Image: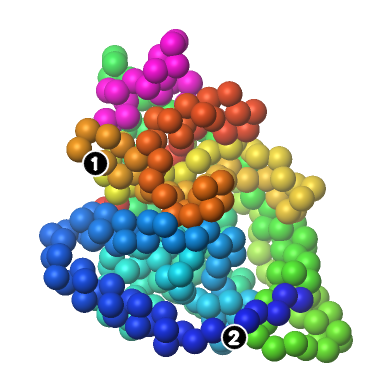
Amino acid sequence: MTYIDTYNIANFNKAIALLYRNLSASKPSDFEARVTAISESFLGRPYLLGSCGEGHEGYFDQAPLYRLDGFDCVTYVNTVLALALSNDVVMFRKKLIQIAYRGGELSYSHRHHFTSVDWNVHNQSKGLIKDVTADILDAHGNSMVETATALIDRPGWFSKRNYSDIRLLQNVSANKEEQLLSEMRAIAMQVEAEESHLPYLPLEKMFDKNGQPIHSIFIQIPHGAVVEIVRPNWDLKEKIGTNLNVSHVGFAIWKGNDLFYRQASSIEKRVCDIPFADYLHYRLFSPTVKGINIQSLTI
């Protein structure tokens, strides 16, 4: 079991209230503008892996439901979108749960643990995002999309949970800890494996033979879009119980004629903007990273 330091959610609520006051003063005109302004306000915040859980009322994971002092890549995207959709703390909390949990039910078993088959599908159905990867065309007007296929083994993943995944605000007895782990692993019997078919834009088609970015392709990526880094059938079965198709998420942010990837980065250890062409070029020869999936904002 992981013991969590006590936190005061009221402090996070005060930070959110201050953010909204500042946002009201700058008056961004639409949803994309709000996403831009809010995501920018967090630049420099530290990277915190597994930064959030289900809060004080969580059964398995009592890490804060939300916080503004640090993020991982998923909690960063969830927090920014929920804040942009809301005008106060109460609405923000409601929107966050709707974005991050299946059916808006706050529980570990309903959390969107898998981007391709959980987060994408759920938020597309709610009209928040739309997959536009296939809309990116080459110089001849043809789609360049390929498909990443992986079996998302939810039962295998839940069966691999261990004591460190139980995060509580108070220590419990060894018997209670064992009971909680058994219950967490038993969720495997309530879920099913699902094949993920995720369209992606191959990195090799985004650069010319000299390794230079093809501007006519990059310029089609919408501002504010959620961009997912695709590793087709990423072999993590032994480590986490399932293979994956997505390893990272962030926002596409245009500043004039320059496109940046705004992300909570485990490499940079903070929320940062990286020139997107540079970010992808570095991964051109990765044995596992093969492309990007693009989810445009639809609100």
Residue 224, visible in the rendered structure: yes
Please identify the quadrant where the C terminus is shown.
bottom left
Q: Position of residue 272 (x, y in %)?
A: 41, 50
Give the distance between the C-alpha atoms of the residues marked 2 and 1, in whole angstroms.
39 Å
Circles 2 and 1 in contact, beta carbons < 8 Å: no
Q: Residue at image x 70%, y 50%?
A: 242
Point out residue 151 in the picture as x, y percentages from the top left corner. 65, 45
Res 32 → quadrant:
bottom left
- Closer to the camera in the image, 174 or 101: 174
Left or right: residue 43 versus residue 49 is: left
Mark identifier at residue 6: 2
Q: Amino acid at mark 1?
A: Lys
> Which residue matches tag 1?
255
Q: Residue at x 46, y 34 (%)?
A: 279
Residue 144 belongs to the span the image colors magenta? no
Three-letter amino acid code at disc 2? Thr
Give the residues drawn in magenta, as a range. Answer: 202-220
Most extreme residue toward the right, as rendered? 175
